[in-house]
Image (cartoon, rainbow, N blue to C red):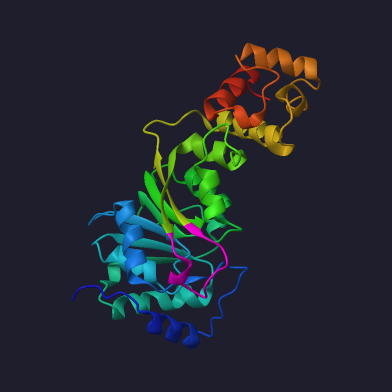
Amino acid sequence: MPVQLLGAGEIRALAAELEVTPTKKLGQNFVVDANTVRKIVQVAGVRAGERVVEVGPGLGSLTLAILETGASVTAVEIDHRLAARLPQTAVAHGVAPDALTVVDADALRVRELPGDPTVLVANLPYNVSVPVLLHFLESFPYLERGVVMVQAEVGERLAAPPGSKIYGAPSVKAAWYGAWRLAGTVSRQVFWPVPNVDSVLVAFQRDAEPRGSEELRRRTFALVDAAFQQRRKMLRQALSGVLGGSAAAASAQLEAAGVAATARGEELSVEDFVRIAEIVGPA
């Protein structure tokens, strides 16, 4: 039988059955609109036969929309009650038992993903969205692309270009792995409970070739952290602690990398930070 999606009434009934009260801490705003979960899956371009990882499936509304395409899902869920119930929900809605694998764990601690999924699809809460995305991109190089629903502030920052007001450390670190773009808005009314913030879809496509080694990534990210620790500071000051211990030493290394010592972190692309990291060399 075809996969049947969850309705709003079913979602509330499941929550009551499991004694789940949506909490801010876990970002549990459940999507209760079938059109929205189908839109997320469509934007992600999920195809039959693909393996998708979903972080925080909750009660399973987005999970079923992914499975509806004929793809298989590895779902990572931190709430033990939700993780235990999800396979039962899936089978009851027409999903073949072998199409869904549930990993009962904190996404930030996961080091292996069954099935080596190539696509990431998720509805991520504000407080862990960036750490989870960066952890997954760092840990699972076989992830090629993805779409996540996040608070508008987070999505806009991830996709921000150099020089924009909201460009920051998450923007640069995300760009290390590939290209990011805003891919749509999401109405507050599709959630239960209704949040008091706007949400967006943000999509990424990993670069065909890695930008550099793990050692270079670590050096680059350390520079990024220092550059954005105090916004609007000139790089010769902001990076003095990691580039020789003084503004003069930092200026020399920045100039060697072809970056103006008077520039600010907000102006630099990930390529600029990488050039500086290459000049610095191993610690």
Task: Residue at 56%, 36% (x, y): give it.
Answer: 172
Task: Residue at 76%, 15% (x, y): give it.
Answer: 249
Quadrant where the image shows the N terminus: bottom left
Against 255, residue 186 (above or below) is below
Left or right? Give the position of 247 relative to 8.
right
Against 27, residue 116 (above or below) is above
Count of all numbered marks drawn on residues in the image: 0
> Where is residue 128, by image quadrant?
bottom right
Against 251, residue 26 (above or below) is below
Q: Position of residue 260 (x, y in %)?
A: 65, 17
User: Does any portion of residue 196 appear in the rendered image?
Assistant: yes
Q: Position of residue 75 (x, y in %)?
A: 42, 63
Left or right? Give the position of 243 relative to 179.
right
Task: Residue at 74%, 19% (x, y): give it.
Answer: 250
Question: For this rendering, which residue is in front, 110 or 237?
Answer: 237
Q: Is residue 121 magenta?
A: no
User: Does any portion of residue 100 appear in the rendered image?
Assistant: no
Question: For this rendering, which residue is in front, 8 or 283?
Answer: 8
Quadrant where the image shows the C terminus: top right
Q: Position of residue 179 (x, y in %)?
A: 43, 37
Left or right? Give the position of 157 relative to 242.
left
Q: Position of residue 158 (x, y in %)?
A: 52, 44
Task: Residue at 58%, 51% (x, y): give it.
Answer: 131
Left or right? Give the position of 217 relative to 41.
right
Question: For this rendering, which residue is in front, 122 or 7?
Answer: 7
> Where is residue 67, by image quadrant?
bottom left
Q: Is residue 195 magenta?
A: yes
Q: Which residues are magenta?
A: 186-199
Against 199, residue 165 (above or below) is above
